[in-house]
Image (cartoon, rainbow, N blue to C red):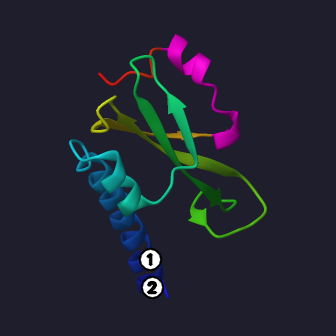
Amino acid sequence: MKKLILFTAILLQLSCSSSKNAMNNSVGETKAKLIKTWGSPVRTLADNQDGQILVYADQVFTNEDNSDGSKIAGQNYWTYNYIYVNKEGKVTSTRQEKQNYPPQAIDSQKMEGMKLLTSK
């Protein structure tokens, strides 16, 4: 049983790191190719340079011991992947973060004030 739990934990770690690497490898690709690979984003925001920010989000539930699990009730958080696309339709950068709020609560005006809408 311990081997099964260890194996599952390793697979989860590998899948998360491969997802992050895949997003980073998208820099320089076209928006159309990114959407074909990753699907439609949950939100699309305008940045302050005539480009767009594609927002991909996954809700993660945690068990009582704060390990990732498939529990429906209980604590949760969101993992966000922000993909910055310039006005020519090319991916310029990516950013990943964890937050406690759902994608509907993302406020583009607040992000602009915090200088998070432009790629660096």
**Residue with the mark numbered 2:** 4
Q: Residue at x 32, y 30 (%)?
A: 86
Quadrant placement of the C terminus: top left
Asked whether, in this view, residue 84 is left or right of residue 54, the answer is left
Q: Which residues are magenta?
A: 100-114
Residue 29, given in percent of the width and then of the height, sits at 24, 47
Q: Residue at x 27, y 39 (%)?
A: 90
Residue 5, given in percent of the width and then of the height, sits at 47, 79
Q: Name the image quarter holding residue 85.
A: top left
Is 19 drawn above or below residue 98 in the view shown? Answer: below
Q: Residue at x 30, y 61 (%)?
A: 18
**Please, what is the three-letter code of the amino acid marked with disc 2?**
Leu
Q: Residue at x 63, y 32 (%)?
A: 106
Is 1 drawn above or below residue 5 in the view shown? Answer: below
Is 3 drawn above or below residue 58 in the view shown? Answer: below
Tell me whether the residue at label 1 lies in contact with that at label 2, contact meaning CB atoms closer than 8 angstroms. yes
* Direction front: furthest residue: 88
The secondary element bearing badge 1 is classed as helix
Q: Which mark is residue 8?
A: 1
**Please, what is the three-letter code of the amino acid marked with disc 1?**
Thr
The secondary element bearing badge 2 is classed as helix
Residue 26, given in percent of the width and then of the height, sits at 26, 49
